[in-house]
Amino acid sequence: MKMSRTNWIHIVLAVILALVALFFIRLHNASGAQSSSAAAGHRLAEAWCRECHAIEAATIGTANPGPDFIKIANQISTTALSLKVFLQTSHGNMPNLILKADETDNLIDYILSLKRN
């Protein structure tokens, strides 16, 4: 079955519209709105990390032994890969957390959402 020129135009317009929609969603998330995975990561940080780390701007300056998440997020070396490696490595001064893959990804998304541009 041969597609007509009109069908091709509709397909191309649909693809362009989808790309524009994805661009605006990405732009919205980059402007400070947290994705659902970052929100899930925030909940994990509340449950597991708050005792030792300041996990949001409101808790910076409290007497926590670990570095605050905003400082971690804004280090030049902080990337999704570096956080993934760090979270999968045992550290003497941190509890040995065993996170599922989606929990690790969510926590990384949350930490990276704190990065200042």
Image (cartoon, rainbow, N blue to C red):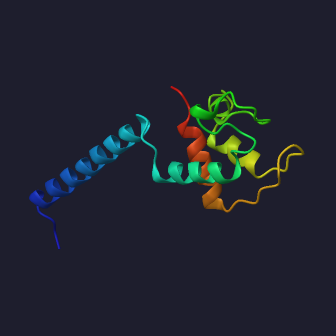
User: Among all residues in the image, which is located at the extreme bottom?
Assistant: 1
Is 10 positioned to the left or the right of 47 in the image? left
Residue 1 vertical position relative to residue 17 in the rendered view, above or below: below
- Residues 11 and 51: in front is 51
Examine the image and state in which quarter residue 92 appears: top right
**Location of residue 43 in the rendering, given as x and y in whole percent from the top left corner:** 58, 52
**Location of residue 59 in the rendering, given as x and y in whole percent from the top left corner:** 63, 34
Residue at the location (80% across, 35% down)? 65
Residue at the location (63% across, 58% down)? 103
Residue at the location (53% across, 39% down)? 113
Residue at the location (20% across, 57% down)? 11
User: Among all residues in the image, which is located at the extreme right?
Assistant: 92
**Location of residue 32 in the rendering, given as x and y in whole percent from the top left corner:** 43, 36
**Location of residue 9 in the rendering, given as x and y in whole percent from the top left corner:** 15, 53
Q: Could you tell me which quadrant the N terminus lies in? A: bottom left
Is 114 positioned to the left or the right of 23 in the image? right
Residue 2 vertical position relative to residue 14 in the rendered view, above or below: below
Is 7 positioned to the left or the right of 113 in the image? left
- Tally the numbered discs: 0
Examine the image and state in which quarter residue 54 appears: top right
